[in-house]
Image (cartoon, rainbow, N blue to C red):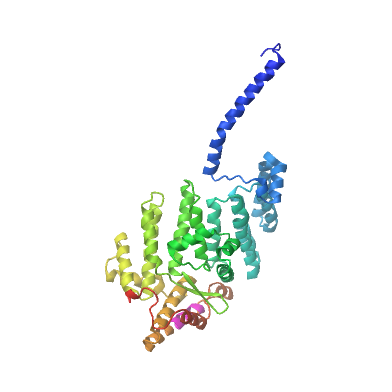
Amino acid sequence: MSRGTNPALRARAFAVLGLAFLLLAGGRHADLVARRGADNLQFVAPEDTTPLVAMTTVAFGAFRGLVADVLWVRAAELQENGQYFELVQLATWISQLEPTIPEVWEFQAWNLAYNISVLFPDPEDRWRWVSHGLDLLRNDGLRNNPVSPVLHWNIGWLFQHKIGMDFDQAHRFFKAELAREAEAAFSHPDGLREVERVFRMNPESVEQLEEAFGPLDWRLPATHSLYWAVRGLRFVRGNAFQARNLQRMRLHSLSQLLLQGEMLTDSGGAPLLALPRFDLTDRLLDELDRLDADPMFGELSRRSMRMVLMEAVLLHAEYGRSARALELYERLARLDVDLLPGPGGLLNLLAQSPLHEDPEQLSRDQALLRLTAMLVQAREWDGLDADRARGYRGMARQFHRRFQAARVSAEHMDRTGLPDFEVMDRAVQTRLPAGIPFQDPEIL
């Protein structure tokens, strides 16, 4: 426009141009909303978050990202120098600045549950930090990112690895505290409302999980990792990496529950050992068959099928379910050309099984599996054949003694040692009636 253009005309022209741009931007709104949903970038209104999140949202506005970047650089320095306590406060600020980025909560929870917890020798102190990490993910992380597969996987991982395995010196204390909390919540008069309050689990999802796999023992870490894996899979949107990670956790959890799916405790409620869930064998194999038809999970299913069949064969054989063990072995042999079909191949496999090694060579979980199998079979023969019952119990006692003797230090014993033999035997006798086969009676 020339200098001589009428100001009123020029103003109208700019108004029309502005309106055009506004309409163009509005036309993109639906697409942006769809993209945000597809990428799990959830918007949380300031009034629905904590006061500090609301304040930073209003105060920093579009500059929050720049402030967060500066804090991330400082966080990396603190992490590298092992200054974990200073990192807690810094990570809190970052999470308030970027609450809808799942990795922010993942970073902070990992620092609490892994880096800081191990600085405390007292198991109760360690559990407090691990619980803090879990609560951070379940309460704050999921509140701001309710459909994040990443956060669901991280919650499941803390149950599966930090609590469920024996790498942490205080893992037995962790398991006992989880069992105590689960026992209190699931037996509460308010039912699943109390479960939702304590564990932040969706009651409907809990019920659906038990409909699919039967009554689950929520005192076990594997049951919780199964829940978070299944729940997280609902929110995966085309991300193959996330889907496979969650599916792998789901299958591992089910496999663990097959081997050790019902907890036995001492008189004080502390975990001792766990009985297998033989009924999960076919359910798990059916799941793998279903996944095999899915291009995203086909390779994972085939690898898992061999592993699950191998575990199921050894489990049934260890408990004396020879007919069922042979049936499962034949299915395994059809998948593995290196295995010889028939009873001879099964016996050869059992001879090479790690479970038949000296007790000193076994992991704690492997030792518990064998010891539990011997105690269960001793109980099955109580009242039917005293000599055979005494024989199984004697083998179990000797096995327990040798495994305990192989602990090379007080730390090793504390982390991987077994409970008192008499207490374990009494727990099995209390749980199982004498002279009656434990599950799968048609196999015996």
Say if 178 sits above or below 419 in the image.
above
Q: Residue at x 43, y 71 (%)?
A: 276
Which quadrant of the rendered structure holds the N terminus? Answer: top right
Say if 390 sits above or below 409 in the image.
below
Say if 24 sits above or below 283 in the image.
above
Say if 157 sits above or below 16 in the image.
below
Q: Is residue 113 visible?
A: yes
- Where's residue 104, x and y in %? 61, 50
Magenta stretch, main secondary structure class: helix
Toward the front, the furthest residue is: 189
Q: Residue at x 63, y 22 (%)?
A: 16
Q: Is 332 left, or right, of 271 in this rendering?
A: left
Image quarter for residue 344? Answer: bottom left
Q: Is 406 left, or right, of 313 in this rendering?
A: right
Given residues 112 and 227, the one toward you in this image is: 227
What is the magenta range? 396-404
- Where's residue 283, x and y in %? 39, 63
Which quadrant of the rendered structure holds the C terminus? Answer: bottom left
Please state the total of marks drawn on the protein image: 0
Q: Is 315 left, or right, of 186 in this rendering?
A: left
- Where's residue 388, x and y in %? 37, 85
Q: Residue at x 41, y 74 (%)?
A: 357
Toward the bottom, the furthest residue is: 386
